[in-house]
Image: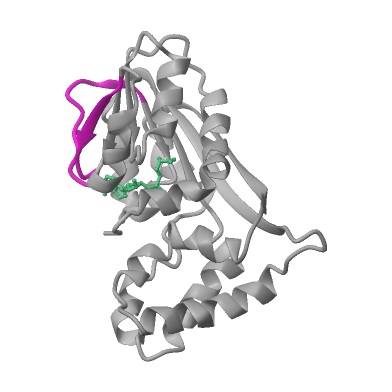
């Protein structure tokens, strides 16, 4: 499991929050009473859920102490729970199970999503966003760098190359328990500033578990190989900024 670094993750906090806002905006619930934010991280999205439905009991669930530590300073009337989602059970059927940028870290979606649907009350909603950029240079070049160096044997088992299924497959996994399903994808074009911003982005997420397995000077060598290829794939624009296209899958299922 990744050793999350909240400060690195929050360097692009605004960009990472936009899918949360877009997903919440389409949830068709008037006044849900029991809400869980699954993989809540530092709690920025959980707080928005509480603001959107102030009367609800909102609980943020995460397995990273480092990420949950950041929620301690939030005074939002939210409950926080340290738990691994692979084994997590709600204490009562939920009206909303919300999850942003989390489930690509979990395996066996064929079992996971039907199981989550059983945790909803009738009329409850499962609302999910996951990245869909597994073939993009950001990710392809990570795999190439892993396979192109002396660390290959150690790092290759940790590569998560295609952890997200096709939209149609999620439809099949959810439709047996759903009265309606809403599904879409969005490509965000993030306009990033500073030096090597794409590498800084992946260092806060998908690169994390791999870097954790390397020590200096190997970690530096790995990053340098990756960095030089990323600079070619995502060149700085004439004004010095860098454009990072980022594709994401959204779906929402209402329990019958
Ligand atoms: C990319 S962050 C997203 C955080 C938050 N949802 C957001 O949108 O800012 C992924 C989060 O999922 C959590 N996570 C990953 N696997 C998990 C698991 N098996 N159980 C609980 N949380 C998990 C990580 O600890 C991390 O905080």
The region drawn magenta spans 78-96
Q: Residue at x 35, y 86 (%)?
A: 151
Q: How is the image coloured?
A: one colour
Comparing 176 with 162, the one in front is 162
Which quadrant holds the C terminus? top left
Q: Main secondary structure of the magenta part?
A: loop
Residue nearest the viewer, comparing 28 with 39: 39
Residue at the outermost right position: 238
| Residue 234 seen in the current view | yes
Left or right: 176 as drawn, with respect to 181: left
Mark yes or no: residue 117 visible.
Answer: no
Give percent across and percent down for residue 102: 38, 46
Q: Nearer the viewer, residue 40 or 221?
A: 221
Q: Is 74 located above or below residue 208 in the figure?
A: above
Numbered label tally: 0
Q: Position of residue 145 (x, y in %)?
A: 48, 81
**51 with respect to 76 (left or right):** right
Quadrant of res 56: top left
Kindly indicate the quadrant of the structure image that contains residue 172.
top left
Magenta run includes residue 79: yes
Residue 249, magenta (yes or no): no
Question: Residue at left 49%, top 74%?
Answer: 142
Left or right side of 126 for 184: right
Residue under the image location 60 percent in, 52 percent down = 247
Q: Is 165 above or below relative to 228? A: above
User: What residue sits 33% from the left and 65% below the top?
Assistant: 209
Quarter of the figure with residue 124: top left
In the rendered image, the quadrant that contains the N terminus is bottom left
| Residue 193 percent location from the top left of the image | 66, 55
């Amino acid at each position: 499991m990744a050793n999350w670094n909240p400060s690195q993750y929050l360097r692009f906090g605004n960009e990472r929050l936009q899918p949360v806002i877009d997903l919440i905006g389409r949830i068709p619930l008037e006044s849900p009473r029991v809400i869980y934010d699954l993989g809540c991280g530092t709690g920025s999205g959980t707080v928005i859920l509480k603001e959107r439905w102030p009367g609800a009991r909102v609980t943020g669930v995460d397995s990273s102490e480092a990420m949950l530590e950041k929620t301690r300073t939030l005074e939002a009337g939210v409950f926080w729970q340290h738990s691994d989602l692979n084994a997590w059970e709600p204490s009562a059927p939920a009206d909303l199970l919300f999850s942003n940028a989390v489930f690509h870290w979990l395996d066996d979606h064929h079992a996971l999503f039907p199981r989550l649907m059983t945790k909803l009350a009738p009329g409850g909603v499962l609302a999910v966003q996951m990245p869909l950029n597994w073939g993009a240079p950001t990710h392809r070049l990570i795999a190439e760098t892993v396979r192109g160096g002396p660390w290959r044997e150690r790092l290759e088992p940790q590569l998560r190359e295609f952890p997200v299924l096709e939209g149609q497959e999620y439809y099949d996994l959810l439709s047996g328990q759903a009265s309606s399903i809403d599904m879409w994808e969005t490509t965000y074009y993030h306009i990033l500033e500073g030096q090597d911003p794409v590498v800084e982005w992946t260092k806060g997420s998908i690169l994390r578990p791999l870097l954790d397995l390397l020590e200096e000077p190997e970690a530096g060598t790995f990053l340098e190989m990756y960095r030089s290829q990323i600079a070619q794939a995502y060149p700085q624009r004439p004004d010095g900024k860098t454009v990072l296209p980022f594709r994401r899958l959204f779906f929402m299922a209402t329990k019958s």
